[in-house]
Image: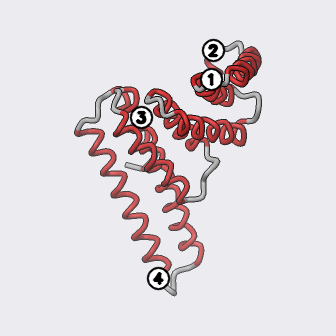
């Protein structure tokens, strides 16, 4: 089974609780990352191996690590939906650290993870952390999608909620007006997802 199939499998499990299947999928992914790391180390230690093959093992390792980080983010969001904030924060932070370790601080999945962390901290009323994650989400989504994309609009709505909760009503209202303008450009509700 290729690693993208595992990502799909874990996404299918989002409607389930953190049961044995989910844990098994996560453990399988950990095994894939370890195998990719071993292949990378072996390839780079072999002096006779062509550089193209060494480069291939490096790419496989990076892709596997990225998909593992995606899975951690998905599991974190799943835990949040189930109200398990402690596990959700753990998975989301592990996913964020995995992306940062691979220098992908502006990857679209980082926006999903930081959005999840912003929502988690907002729900737990830890507004300073919620604001920091919401601002980071706005930055990432701007870099990934631009100023007029529904994903950017979603990010500024989260930031507006946080700002409203800490009493910064003016900025919250300004952001919500901006969100409305963006979403008005997308009459198709599927484009907003």
Residue 45: give its label.
Answer: 4
Disc 2 and disc 3: Cα gap in Å?
Answer: 22 Å
Disc 1 and disc 3: Cα gap in Å?
Answer: 37 Å
Query: Are the two marked residues, 1 and 2, in contact with CB atoms closer than 8 angstroms?
Result: no
**Above or below — where is 41 with respect to 115?**
below
Colour mode of the rendering: secondary structure
Q: Position of residue 191 (x, y in %)?
A: 65, 21
Q: Secondary structure at mark 2?
A: helix
- Farthest-out residue, bottom: 47
Residue that badge 3 annotates = 11
Disc 2 and disc 4: Cα gap in Å?
Answer: 52 Å
Disc 1 and disc 2: Cα gap in Å?
Answer: 31 Å
**Above or below — where is 105 with respect to 147?**
below
Residue that badge 1 annotates = 167
- The quarter holding residue 132 reads top right
Q: Earlier in the sequence, mark 2 or mark 4?
A: 4
Q: Quadrant of the C terminus?
A: top right
Residue 42 appears anywhere in the view: yes
Residue that badge 2 annotates = 189
Q: Earlier in the sequence, mark 4 or mark 3?
A: 3
Label 3: how many Cα within 10 Å (few below 14, some 14–19, many 20+): some
Residue 182 appears anywhere in the view: no
- As rendered, which of 15 and 99 lies closer to the eye? 99
Q: Position of residue 185 (x, y in %)?
A: 76, 17
């Amino acid at each position: 089974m290729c690693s993208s199939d595992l990502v799909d499998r874990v996404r299918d499990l989002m409607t389930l609780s953190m049961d044995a299947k989910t844990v098994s999928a996560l453990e399988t992914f950990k095994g894939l990352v370890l195998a990719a790391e071993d292949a990378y180390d072996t390839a780079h230690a072999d002096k006779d191996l062509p550089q193209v093959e060494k480069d291939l093992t490096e790419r496989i390792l990076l892709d596997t690590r990225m998909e593992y980080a995606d899975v951690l983010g998905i599991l974190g969001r799943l835990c949040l939906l189930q109200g398990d904030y402690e596990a959700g924060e753990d998975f989301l932070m592990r996913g964020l650290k995995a992306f940062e370790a691979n220098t992908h601080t502006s990857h679209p999945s980082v926006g999903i993870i930081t959005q999840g962390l912003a929502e988690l901290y907002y729900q737990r009323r830890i507004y300073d952390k919620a604001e920091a994650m919401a601002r980071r989400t706005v930055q990432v989504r701007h870099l990934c999608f631009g100023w007029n994309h529904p994903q950017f609009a979603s990010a500024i709505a989260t930031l507006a909620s946080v700002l409203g909760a800490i009493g910064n009503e003016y900025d919250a209202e300004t952001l919500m007006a901006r969100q409305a303008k963006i979403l008005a450009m997308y009459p198709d509700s599927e484009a907003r997802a």
